[in-house]
Amino acid sequence: MATESVSVENPYGLQALWAQGDFIAKGVLILLALMSAYSWFIIFTKWWEQRRLLKQATEADKNFWAAENIKTGVNKLSGKATSSRRSPRRPSTRLSTTTRR
């Protein structure tokens, strides 16, 4: 007994939609593909950014707990291990320095 292989095309597939669709259907398919690619781009860039931030947080945590006292640990967190003054870029520091005059 010989078995015959019959190829049945799917009338609901993408190939049939592209072949039988008008310019609106094709435009929607292209738009969906572009939006999908852009969504994956955003997912990967956010993943990469989160990975970088996690590495920085791990390094900051290690530096803080390795400090000999709290003041040195806080200075290491702000990125200034030698200076104990606050950054002039912070609005709270600018406000406090302007009220002292």
Image (cartoon, rainbow, N blue to C red):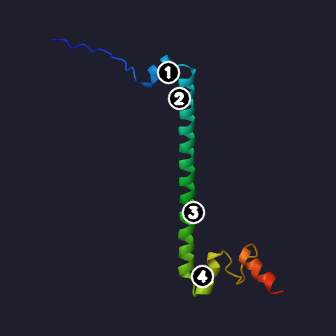
Residue positioned 54% across, 49% down in the render: 44
Numbered circle sitting on residue 29: 2
The residue sitting at the left extreme is: 1
- Label pair 4/1, CB-CB below 8 angstroms: no
What residue would you read off at disc 1? 18
Estimate the x, y position of residue 42 in percent, counting from the top left: 57, 47
Q: Which mark is residue 9?
A: none
Q: Earlier in the sequence, mark 3 or mark 2?
A: 2
Measured in 3D between alpha carbons, the distance from the residue under mark 3 to the one under mark 2, in whole angstroms, is: 36 Å
Relative to residue 68, is residue 58 depicted above or below? above
Inspect the image, locate mark 4, and give the three-letter code of the amino acid beneath it. Answer: Gly
- Quarter holding the C terminus? bottom right
**Is 5 placed above or below 14 here?**
above
Q: Position of residue 70 (x, y in %)?
A: 58, 86
Query: Could you tell me if the residues under marks 3 and 2 are in contact, i.e. CB atoms within 8 Å?
Result: no
Q: Secondary structure at mark 1?
A: helix
Q: Which mark is residue 73?
A: 4
Residue under pointer 3: 53
Nearer to us: label 4 or label 2: 2
State the quadrant of the N terminus.
top left
| Distance of label 4 from label 1 (alpha carbons) | 62 Å
Q: Earlier in the sequence, mark 4 or mark 3?
A: 3
Q: Nearer the viewer, residue 97 or 73?
A: 97
The Cα atoms of the two marked residues, 4 and 3, are separated by: 19 Å
Q: Residues within 10 Å of mark 3 (few under 14, many from 20)?
A: few
Left or right of 80? Residue 35 is left
> Does residue 2 sit above or below 96 in this rendering?
above
Residue 54 coordinates in the image, percent (x, y): 53, 64
Q: Earlier in the sequence, mark 4 or mark 2?
A: 2
Q: Which sits in the foreground, 84 or 20?
A: 20
Amino acid under label 3? Leu
Q: Nearer the viewer, mark 4 or mark 1?
A: 1
